């Protein structure tokens, strides 16, 4: 899709120039071609007569009228106001423009020239409700005799682009419009013709025009569908090829199940594996014993016992004299795992260490030396373990906990580091199958669909803050522990409670029972100390932010109070709740929310209705949240130009089915009709995902 260097440079497009070219470069826009495929993030309906509405359209207030009079107002501040009264039939509207005063020139000279009595002018902006005389704060205006304005700016659906400071939407519209009109009709793109027909996709050339400047809603929907399909189809294809490619690699090591570590570990555990754990461990082991590297996702609800399953895998490697890296998304969680390992590996000849940014330099050096010499079996840490300077003598297993915190790109980088190592990835955020395929399409899946025995459901309720405190005090007085989660670290607005502020208020509230504080801005060592203190025997409360969302495991903790619950997504609420109900005690989760909006209330109700993450994952509110997390451009890793995994899940399902059919017919994309497709695949995913070749 990119053109050759030196050709089609954006800077030479009329109206751009070097300064704006530099701003466009910040958006990764260098060539005219890039602009054409810089899709809007939304569309605004600026038509006088609106058609049916569509979720794709934002509305705008538009007025066309004849100028009756205009005047300039001076305020006591340095602000200047220009007002114009326009008439259309019986209707009068006062439009206002605001500008900062400038000593050196008349800030409204242009407006004065344009707003002549009798001139017909379009106004776009925000209408203010005023019964007697409607007023508008004007954002843009266009002279009605300037007919070209109706091609791109007014009385039509206009594109809204993601921009950066210094670039206006108007400039973007002008520039994209110019790029489109200078475009020679080119090839039809890379989709095989039969798929275009099968999915009734409009042609590529017209879709390209319509995605920016649609004539109506159905043109917009058609064009959008085309590009969403293109994007998702290519993604689906890339996964399939990547998967095939990794299947062809062979490990340069092999294992035997010796049980020298596994058996004593099992005997030490103090509990039996659940059926689901046994099944998952079997799947993991058979992957590890196979010739090709394992790439497996272990999915299981919070508290289903993923850690010991992963630890079993580490021990199989260690029994065979091979090394493992065990990575967690946060330092707290890495520390927690270290703690857990200490407990479960007591007395076993396994060498394991914790490496985080908080590890003292001397200790760090020692650990690095040992890892390189093969004197550490399991190295626990954050992802810096394999991104950084750590070298292993014979790294054979990479375990990644709470995978949803890592992006696709990061994972691809990991994969590159350890092409031949086995990889086990864990997540407690269940994902529906199509989403799973799009995110982890190259992975095999094991699921822990059973909880360890004796778990009592966490009683979940929405209660007023006062009641939450009283109930918490009750638990604490029985020697138990509680988490109290707040949305922000420091006070930022009146509506949001903050950790620091509330900590000060709460610390004396429970009559001598220790209260701790934990948030992301604390130093690693401090977090570690706090966690250890909180985990030590006896009652205690931990006032924290969402940092404790993942992985924390303190069995005596049995109350979770979530303040400003409306601020959290469903997946997060469920993760937080998963921090309690881990021991033999009755547990509770209290959601405090003074006035949740409609959507927040939907989430809170969903939480109160079930304890199962898998059930929650079927709910719209959950999917929407996941879609947002993994969605379009906000999530740098996915780099979708236009598709949204949640909104477009049906198109995605079609793309997956079409891909399978295509690969069945033409497994190596060697038919001429698929030549363009193959080229595009390597252009987009070749380096990004390290896809080498098809055969
Ligand atoms: P998650 O899947 O959320 O990572 P963990 O691995 O932290 O869950 O396990 C949650 C708790 O359950 C831990 O305290 C762990 O020791 C315990 N556990 C794991 N498996 C079993 C089992 N089969 N029987 C009883 N307790 C178990
Ligand atoms: Mg876990």
Image: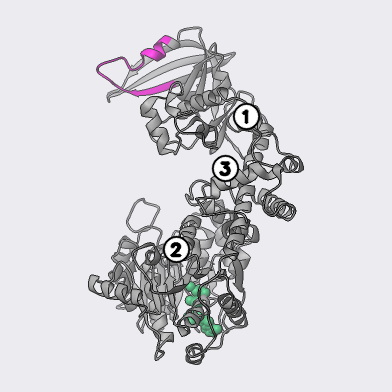
Q: Residue 569, position in %: x, y?
A: 51, 58
44 part of magenta stretch: no
CB contact under 8 Å: marks 3 and 1? no
Q: Which of the numbered marks, if any, corresponds to residue 16?
A: none
Give the mark nearer the N terminus: 3 vs 1.
1
Residue at 63% from the left image edge and 52% from the top image edge: 237
CA separation in Å, label 2 and label 1: 40 Å
Q: Which of the numbered marks, if any, corresponds to residue 642?
A: 3
Camera-nearest residue between 376 and 547: 376
Q: Which residue is mark 2?
A: 417
Graded by Cα atoms within 10 Å as few (under 14), some (14 to 19) or many (20 or more), the crowding at tag 1 reads few
Give the mark nearer the N terminus: 2 vs 3.
2
Q: Residue 369, position in %: x, y?
A: 30, 74
Residue at 61% from the left image edge and 38% from the top image edge: 56
Would residue 585 be seen by someone viewing this image from the given angle? no
Q: Which of the numbered marks, if any, corresponds to residue 186?
A: 1
109 part of magenta stretch: yes
Element at label 3: loop
The answer to whether 137 appears left or right of 242 in the picture is left
Closest to the camera, between mark 3 and mark 1, is: 1
**472 shown above or below 624:** below
Camera-nearest residue between 276 and 391: 391
Q: Residue 407, position in %: x, y?
A: 48, 57
The answer to whether 662 appears left or right of 518 in the picture is right
Element at label 1: loop
Would residue 460 be seen by someone viewing this image from the given angle? yes
Residue 562 picture quarter: bottom left
Q: Which residues are magenta?
A: 96-113
CA separation in Å, label 2 and label 3: 30 Å
Residue at 63% from the left image edge and 46% from the top image edge: 678
Give the mark nearer the N terminus: 2 vs 1.
1
Camera-nearest residue between 401 and 185: 185
């Amino acid at each position: 899709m990119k053109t050759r260097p030196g050709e089609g440079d954006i800077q030479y497009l009329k109206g751009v120039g070097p300064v704006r070219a530099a701003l466009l470069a910040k958006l990764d826009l260098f060539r005219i071609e890039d602009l054409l495929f810089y899709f809007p993030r939304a569309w605004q309906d600026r038509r006088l007569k609106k058609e049916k509405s569509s979720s794709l359209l934002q509305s705008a207030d538009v007025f066309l009228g004849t100028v009756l009079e205009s005047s300039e107002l001076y305020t006591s501040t340095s602000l200047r106001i220009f007002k114009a009264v326009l008439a259309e039939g019986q209707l009068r509207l006062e439009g206002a423009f605001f500008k900062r005063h400038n000593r050196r020139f008349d800030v409204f000279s242009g407006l004065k020239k344009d707003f002549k009595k009798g001139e017909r002018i379009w106004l776009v902006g925000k209408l203010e409700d005023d019964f007697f005389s409607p007023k508008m704060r004007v954002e843009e205006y266009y002279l009605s005799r300037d007919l070209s304005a109706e091609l791109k700016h007014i009385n039509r659906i206009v594109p809204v682009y993601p921009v950066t400071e210094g670039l206006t939407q108007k400039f973007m519209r002008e520039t994209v419009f110019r790029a489109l009109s200078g475009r020679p009709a080119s090839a039809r793109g890379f989709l095989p013709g039969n798929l275009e027909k099968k999915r009734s996709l409009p042609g590529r050339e017209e879709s390209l025009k319509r995605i920016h400047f649609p004539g109506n809603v159905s043109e917009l929907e058609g064009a959008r569908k085309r590009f969403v399909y293109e994007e998702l189809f290519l993604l689906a294809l890339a996964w399939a090829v990547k998967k095939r490619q990794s299947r062809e690699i062979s490990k340069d090591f092999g294992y035997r199940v010796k049980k020298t570590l596994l058996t004593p570990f099992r005997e030490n555990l103090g509990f039996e594996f659940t059926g689901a754990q046994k099944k998952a461990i079997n799947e993991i082991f058979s992957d590890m014993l196979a010739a090709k590297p394992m790439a497996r996702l272990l999915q299981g609800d919070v508290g289903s016992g993923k850690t010991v399953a992963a630890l079993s895998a580490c021990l199989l490697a260690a029994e065979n004299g091979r090394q493992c890296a065990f990575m967690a998304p946060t330092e707290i969680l890495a520390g927690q795992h270290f703690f857990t390992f200490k407990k479960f590996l007591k007395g076993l000849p396994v060498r394991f260490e914790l490496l985080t940014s908080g590890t003292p330099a001397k200790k760090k050096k020692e650990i690095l030396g040992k890892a390189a010499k093969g004197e550490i079996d399991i190295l626990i840490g954050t992802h810096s373990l394999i991104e950084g300077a750590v070298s292993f003598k014979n790294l054979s297993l990479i375990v990644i906990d709470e995978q949803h915190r890592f992006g696709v790109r990061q994972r691809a980088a990991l994969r590159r580091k350890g092409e031949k190592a086995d990889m086990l990835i864990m997540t407690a955020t269940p994902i529906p199958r199509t989403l799973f395929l799009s995110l982890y399409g190259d992975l095999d899946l094991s699921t822990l669909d059973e909880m360890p025995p004796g778990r009592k459901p966490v009683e979940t309720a929405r209660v007023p803050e006062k009641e939450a405190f009283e109930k918490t005090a009750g638990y604490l007085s029985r020697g138990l522990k509680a988490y109290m989660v707040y949305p922000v670290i420091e006070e930022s607005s009146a509506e949001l409670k903050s950790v620091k502020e509330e900590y000060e208020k709460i610390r004396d509230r429970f009559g001598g029972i220790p209260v701790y504080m934990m948030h992301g801005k604390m130093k690693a060592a401090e977090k570690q100390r706090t966690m250890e203190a909180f985990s030590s025997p006896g009652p205690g409360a931990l006032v924290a932010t969402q940092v404790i969302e993942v992985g924390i495991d303190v069995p005596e903790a049995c109350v979770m109070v979530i303040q400003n619950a409306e601020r959290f997504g469903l997946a997060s609420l469920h993760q937080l709740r998963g921090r309690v109900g881990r021991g033999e005690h009755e547990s509770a989760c209290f959601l405090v929310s003074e006035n949740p909006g409609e959507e927040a209330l939907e989430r809170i109700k969903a939480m109160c209705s079930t304890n199962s993450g898998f059930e929650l994952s079927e709910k719209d509110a959950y999917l929407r949240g996941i879609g947002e997390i993994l969605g379009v451009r906000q999530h740098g890793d996915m780099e979708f130009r236009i598709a949204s995994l949640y909104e477009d899940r049906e198109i995605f399902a079609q793309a997956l089915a079409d891909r399978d059919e295509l690969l069945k017919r033409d497994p190596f994309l060697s038919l001429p009709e698929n030549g363009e497709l193959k080229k595009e695949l390597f252009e987009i995913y070749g380096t990004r995902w390290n896809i080498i070749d098809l055969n």
